[in-house]
Image (cartoon, rainbow, N blue to C red):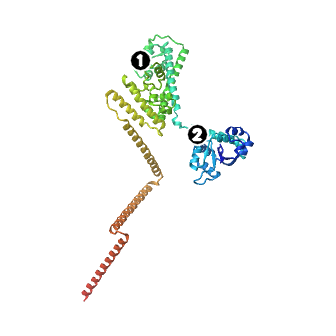
């Protein structure tokens, strides 16, 4: 049985024929040893056909189909042209050696060509790959390497390609940065309090918020310069006029020590840095909210943006979170407590990061575990919808949130919640209605644009407008007349069809009626002439 080899290079498809395999050996080890020698290998394996790719995009498409184990139309036509034809109902007298077993099975199913892909074939293809530039004469020394590099880059780029708007890595980095900023702002604001308290210790008791304290310290600077002129500015910052007056009075009778101008400048700079960090933290939180609504809208609407982002970051990605069962999602973030409980054979933790959700805080102490289990179940559903749905929407997240609220009422008051099937059906119906509305809105917008364009055409004064109205009225009248004529014609045709069974019968009746009418008219005319003659006589 003859053996052909299919080699998918970076520049095109090549077909080789292996003849006289006894020279290099039938064993894989013998082939492996003799592959390096081109003189021996070139006598056995010979090039029969070569088809280059049309372009780089075509090469990428062919490479993708081969990697997926699919035979393209180009490959099929190439094989049918260059391989011996197989008669129907008979087995092929040759076999095709292929590197990919999936591709070989697909070729054999569609073209009924027997394919094989074993170690022996792979060693032969290794020799073809090694001496490929020697088999094709027109190739220049650097052409093959350039084609391989370009195809490798484009193939890897296509495999790594993703939707930029749904990158969960941005959410992971943002939540990590948000947590570190919270710690840093807290420690820096405490440092500002300690530092400025040497100068104005009474301010700590009046202003409790760290951000507001930094702003007030930046505004006051030196306590000895505090006066009633500062009250409006202080009320803007604090939002309470009584507290502003209290600060001014405390500054007058303060027990703090005086600071040098250089020390005060350093305190002011550090307070400004804390304020900038706090403002950046607010902007980062807004960014996280928008990103979570883009990436995981259902999870964000169910459990909140921050807790949802923490779950995604702890799992590693949204796909990893979607793959997690609800029992794993329930204790995400409590791994240490879980393994400690398994070692000591104690009670396992009931919740991890989910504990930061408001639902578990609202549940009673005995129902916290139940609530965590139920919430984890709904979170896993929401994460799977967000991960694998084509369009992002908050419909399912809102419905799941309603279910969690109903479960809380059931635990507290005993009100029976709705069934899960009914809630999911209503969610699917609402999504379908939204899709229909979106589809209906697009042609309406297009027609509105067209009408606007027609209206926006220039008109030659009021006369042109009146002429246009008159022409429109005339057109409408003509249309109405045509419609009336059509209706009358249809009614006449219907009457004719009812009167006659067949078309010929109808015609005969019509001619008979005409003849009768004619005979009646002739008789009347004859009687009139007779009367006239009698009257003359």
Whole-angstrom CA distance, mark 2 to mark 1, is 66 Å
| Number of marks drawn | 2
Marker disc for residue 158: 2
Q: Residues within 10 Å of mark 2 (few under 14, many from 20)?
A: few
Residue 10 occupies quadrant: top right
* Residue drawn at the location 50% of the way across and 29% of the way down: 315
Of badges 2 and 1, the one in the foreground is: 2
**Mark 1: few/some/many CA within 10 Å (<14, 14-19, 20+):** some
Determine whether 505 is above or below 333 in the image. Answer: below
Q: Answer yes or no: do the residues labelled 2 and 1 have beta carbons within 8 Å? A: no
332, 260: nearer the viewer: 332
Left or right of 232: which side holds 42?
right
In-image side of 250 versus 115 (left or right): left
Q: Residue at x 53, y 16 (%)?
A: 264
Q: Position of residue 479 (x, y in %)?
A: 40, 60
Could one spot residue 54 in this view of the protein?
Answer: no
Q: Is residue 80 above or below residue 133?
A: below
The structure residue drawn at horizontal position 48% and vertical position 37%, both measured from the top left corner, is 388
Q: Which of these two is toward me, 492 or 9?
A: 9
Question: Which residue, as the protein is rendered here, is positioned at the far right?
Answer: 39
In-front residue for pair 48/407: 48
On the rendered structure, is 225 left or right of 84?
left
Of the numbered discs 2 and 1, the one sitting upstream in the chain is 2
Residue closest to the far bottom: 537
Numbered mark located on residue 245 in the image: 1
**Callout 1 secondary element:** helix
250 versus 49 height, above or below: above
Label 2, secondary structure: give it.
Answer: helix
Whole-percent x, y for residue 7 in the image: 65, 44
Q: x%, y% of residue 212?
A: 46, 21
């Amino acid at each position: 049985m003859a053996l052909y080899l299919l080699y998918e290079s970076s520049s095109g498809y090549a077909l080789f024929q292996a003849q006289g395999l006894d020279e290099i050996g039938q064993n894989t080890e013998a082939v492996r040893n003799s592959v390096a020698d081109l003189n021996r290998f070139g006598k056995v394996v010979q090039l029969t056909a070569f088809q280059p790719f049309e372009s780089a995009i075509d090469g990428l498409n062919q490479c993708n189909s081969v990697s997926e184990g699919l035979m393209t139309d180009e490959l099929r036509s190439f094989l049918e042209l260059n391989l011996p034809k197989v008669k129907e109902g008979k087995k092929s007298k040759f076999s095709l050696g292929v590197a990919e077993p999936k591709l070989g099975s697909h070729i054999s199913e569609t073209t009924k060509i027997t394919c094989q892909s074993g170690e022996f074939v792979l060693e032969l293809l290794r020799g073809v790959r090694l001496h490929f530039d020697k088999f094709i004469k027109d190739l220049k020394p650097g052409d093959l390497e350039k084609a391989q590099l370009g195809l490798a880059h484009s193939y890897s780029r296509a495999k790594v390609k993703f939707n930029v708007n749904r990158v969960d890595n941005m959410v992971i980095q943002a939540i990590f940065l948000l947590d570190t900023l919270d710690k840093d702002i807290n420690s820096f604001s405490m440092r500002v309090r300690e530092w400025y308290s040497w100068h104005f210790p009474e301010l700590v008791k009046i202003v409790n918020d760290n951000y507001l304290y930094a702003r007030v310290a930046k505004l006051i600077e030196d306590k000895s310069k505090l006066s009633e002129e500062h009250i409006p500015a202080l009320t803007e910052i604090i939002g309470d006029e009584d507290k502003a007056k209290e600060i001014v009075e405390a500054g007058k009778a303060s027990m703090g020590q005086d600071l040098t101008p250089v020390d005060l400048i350093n305190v002011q700079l550090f307070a400004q840095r804390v304020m900038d960090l706090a403002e950046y933290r607010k902007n980062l939180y807004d960014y996280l909210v928008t990103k979570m609504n883009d990436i995981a809208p259902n999870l964000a609407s169910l459990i909140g943006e921050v807790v949802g982002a923490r779950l995604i970051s702890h799992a590693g990605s949204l796909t990893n979170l979607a793959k997690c069962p609800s029992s794993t999602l329930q204790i995400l973030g409590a791994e240490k407590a879980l393994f400690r409980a398994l070692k000591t054979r104690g009670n396992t933790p009931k919740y991890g990061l989910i504990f930061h959700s408001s639902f578990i805080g609202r549940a009673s102490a005995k129902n916290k575990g139940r609530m965590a289990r139920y919430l984890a179940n709904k979170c896993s559903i929401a994460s799977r919808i967000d991960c694998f749905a084509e369009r992002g929407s908050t419909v399912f997240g809102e419905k799941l949130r309603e279910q969690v609220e109903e479960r809380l009422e059931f635990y507290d008051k005993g009100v029976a919640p709705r069934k899960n099937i009914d809630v999911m059906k209503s969610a699917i119906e609402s999504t379908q209605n939204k899709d229909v509305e979106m589809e209906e809105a697009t042609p309406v917008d297009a027609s509105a644009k067209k009408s606007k364009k027609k209206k926006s055409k220039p008109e030659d004064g009021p006369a042109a407008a009146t002429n246009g109205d008159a022409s429109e009225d005339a057109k409408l009248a003509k249309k109405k007349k045509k419609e009336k004529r059509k209706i009358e014609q249809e009614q006449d045709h219907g009457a004719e069809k009812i009167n006659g069974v067949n078309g010929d019968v109808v015609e005969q009746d019509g001619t008979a009626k005409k003849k009768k009418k004619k005979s009646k008219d002739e008789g009347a005319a004859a009687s009139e002439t007779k009367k006239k003659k009698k009257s003359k006589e």
